Image (cartoon, rainbow, N blue to C red):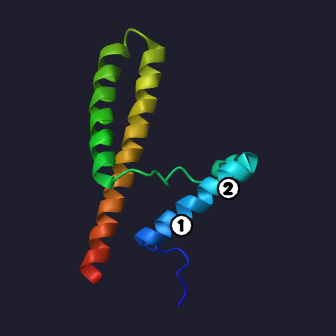
Amino acid sequence: MSDAGRDVTLSESERRALAEIESALVTADPALHRRMLVGRPARHIRMHPRSMLLLGAAGFVASMVVLLVTFAASLWAGVAASLCLLGSMFLLTEAVSTLVKGRRTRATS
């Protein structure tokens, strides 16, 4: 049975070992580390899902307010608010999918 495509939970000692390897890579070859980060998808945000949910909700509300207030006055402010709105929607969807995935894992185990 292959674990490809599934999330695997690491123990605390494995997480520490992985962090040590990554920090050693950063000090040994920073250029390689930067190249490896460029190919990483944006969905690997290292935040707690509830924090992402709160940040996404706050960003969504703030962006909507800025969008509604400034769009008629300034096109650039409206475009910037729209981009912030998209970013906060991304955070919200990532947080919700992570929370739902965590609940499914707990329910099946």
Tell me where residue 50 appears, x and y as whole percent: 27, 51
Classify mark 1: helix, strand or loop.
helix
Q: Position of residue 19 (x, y in %)?
A: 54, 59
Residue located at (34% from left, 68% from top): 101
Secondary structure beneath dot 2 equals helix
Count of residue discs: 2
Q: Quadrant of residue 49?
A: bottom left
Which quarter of the rendered picture does the C terminus lie within? bottom left
Query: For mark 2, does the 10 Å Cα neighbourhood hold few (<14), some (14 to 19), or many (20 or more) residues?
Result: some
Residue pictured at 30% horizontal, 61% vertical: 99
Residue 106 placement: quadrant? bottom left
Vertical position of residue 54 compared to residue 83: above or below: below
Q: How dense is the environment of label 1, judged by Cα within 10 Å: few (below 14), some, or many (20 and up)?
A: few
Q: Earlier in the sequence, mark 1 or mark 2?
A: 1
Depth order, front residue of 8/60: 8
Image-based side of 66 in relation to 75, left or right = left
Q: Which residue is mark 1?
A: 17
Looking at this view, is 41 or 90 the one in front?
41
Q: Which mark is residue 53?
A: none
Q: Amino acid at mark 1?
A: Ala
Kind of residue at badge 2: Leu
Q: Where in the figure is residue 41, as x and y percent of width and height? A: 57, 53
Please tell me which residue lies in front, 82 or 101: 101
At horizontal 27% and vertical 43% (from top left) the residue drawn is 54
Spatial CA span between label 1 and label 2: 12 Å
Q: Residue furthest top?
A: 73
Residue of label 2? 25
Rendered location of residue 78, percent (x, y)? 42, 20
In the image, what residue occupies the spot 34% across and 53% down?
Answer: 48
Q: Image height check: is 87 above or below 46?
A: above
For the residues labelled 1 and 2, say whether their Cβ atoms are less than 8 Å apart: no
31 left or right, relative to 93: right
